[in-house]
Image: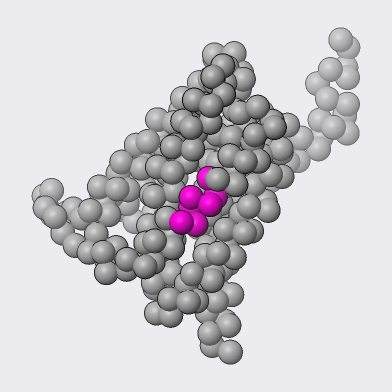
Amino acid sequence: MELVLAFLTLAFLEVVLGIDNIIFISILTNKLPEEIRKKARTLGIALALVFRVLMLLSITWIMGFQEELFRLGDHPVSGRDLVLLAGGIFLLWKSTKEIYEITEAGGAQHGQNSNVAKSFAGIIVQIAILDIVFSFDSILTAIGMTDDLRIMIAAIVVAMFVMLQFSGPVSKVIERHPSLQILALAFLILIGFMLVAEAAGYHVPKAYIYMAVGFSLGVEVLNIRGKVRGGGPTSKGH
């Protein structure tokens, strides 16, 4: 019974920790032609699963990443801090660039590359980079919950399956409502800031970010429903 409870709790936490990963994958794959988006999402989530399982099988190496490499003032800097810093900066840059393309550079389709194969490969590489960063939180959570490697791997496999099932609907909703896409990118910017702060030794509970984004999402959903019921912005006049 204890193992089942640990498995269910860990699987739930892994799904929660994977929310930002789903959003990032959905936004990137929406830049591809529709017929290959599912393939890109599946490959991206499969990469996330591979990275997490490999890290679990290298727990000693992962724990070594938390050892001090050098100090900046009073803050001991570890390999994990450097990975989080690089990931946070990348997420800040990428999310800001996507917002610029949507709002200033001709909409979401502006980012599509005429060379589909090159664009597909580039997006998979970007997903892989963030997968590595997000995997650290996932693995450290798993290690903190149980010392049974089978439970860890099973929970991560279930979480990846849930992510795979929800990534398609999330992508469609984000694509259908540009305002939600901006909100999702703003959420990723917050995650980027959180990663940079974490690397600098300032722990920011993710619950605060999820609450803020959840509230904003609730307001935006009400706004969308109001527009639908009211016939949209074009119903009055032109």
Query: With respect to residue 179, does 52 lie above or below?
Result: below
Question: Residue 137: horizontal and vertical position, in percent?
Answer: 40, 58
**Residue at the front extreme of this rendering:** 117
Looking at the image, residue 145 sits to the left or right of residue 34; the answer is: left
- Residue at the spot x=54%, y=88% of the render? 2
Specify start and end residues of the magenta stretch as a single range: 44-50
Question: Residue 92: horizontal and vertical position, in percent?
Answer: 40, 34
Q: Is residue 219 visible?
A: no
Quarter assignment of residue 78:
bottom left
235 drawn magenta: no
Question: Residue 200: horizontal and vertical position, in percent?
Answer: 25, 49
* Magenta stretch: dominant secondary structure: helix
**Residue at the top extreme of this rendering:** 238
Q: How many marks?
A: 0
> Which quarter of the image is occupied by the N terminus?
bottom right
Looking at the image, residue 193 sits to the left or right of residue 100; the answer is: left
- Residue at the spot x=88%, y=33% of the render? 229
Quarter assignment of residue 59:
bottom left
Query: With respect to residue 39, does 57 lie above or below?
Result: below
45 drawn magenta: yes
- Residue at the spot x=54%, y=13% of the render? 105
Q: Is residue 85 visible?
A: yes
Question: Residue 208: horizontal and vertical position, in percent?
Answer: 49, 54
